[in-house]
Amino acid sequence: MKHRALPSRIEPAQDSPFFKSLHDEIERVFDRFGTGWPMSARDLWDRSEDSLMPALDIAETDTAIDISAEIPGVAEKDIDVSITDGVLTLKGEKSSDHEEKEENYHVVERRYGSFRRSVSLGFTPDEGKVQARFKDGVLKLHIDKPEGAASRTRKIKIGKS
């Protein structure tokens, strides 16, 4: 009886063609399954833990970066913003309770979880050069670039193959 050696390296799921193919097939099944239902497959996906991840809008100029993060349902005291070695990190906790009582039923729903989102800035801003505001579930950051940060950018020419 001949034994096969186990692979010396197991590929991470995101790099594996098998898991990519499986993921795509599951998405197709949910898309077909969701048609005709009051709730689509995308609605199911959006209710997962990934829905806690804040959506970001990032705009960059020669002198600054402006970031807008949508974080509805999260209190300002539950948000942590930090910059370490040129990486901006947003962390937070979200929790919500919903209770509905009627004569024939009683529903209690609790959703909670944490999120962490990191963005590489490519520079570490100088002390006092970051302004943050939070209003109506939107966090806005204005980050001034340090002197010389713009000059480190190189334009790469794309050639034809």
Image (cartoon, rainbow, N blue to C red):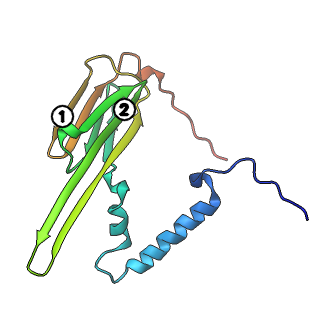
Residue extending furthest right? 1
On screen, residue 99 versus residue 120, left or right, reads left
Query: Which residue occupies 58% across, 40% down?
Result: 158
Q: Is residue 161 left or right of residue 63?
A: right
Q: Position of residue 118 (x, y in %)?
A: 40, 38
Residue at label 2? Answer: 88
Mark 1 to mark 2 CA distance (whole Å): 15 Å
Front residue of 42 and 151: 42
- When the figure is inspected, residue 58 is found, relative to residue 5, above or below; the finding is above
Rendering coords of residue 113 (x, y %):
31, 50
Residue in the image at 12% along x and 81% along y: 104
Q: In which quarter of the view is residue 121 placed?
A: top left
* 41 is higher (above) or lower (below) than 46: below
Q: Is residue 49 left or right of residue 102?
A: right
Q: Residue furthest left?
A: 103
Residue at (65% x, 51% y) in the render: 11
Disc 1 target residue = 133
Q: Position of residue 140 (x, y in %)?
A: 23, 37
Pick whichever of labels 1 and 2 is earlier in the sequence: 2
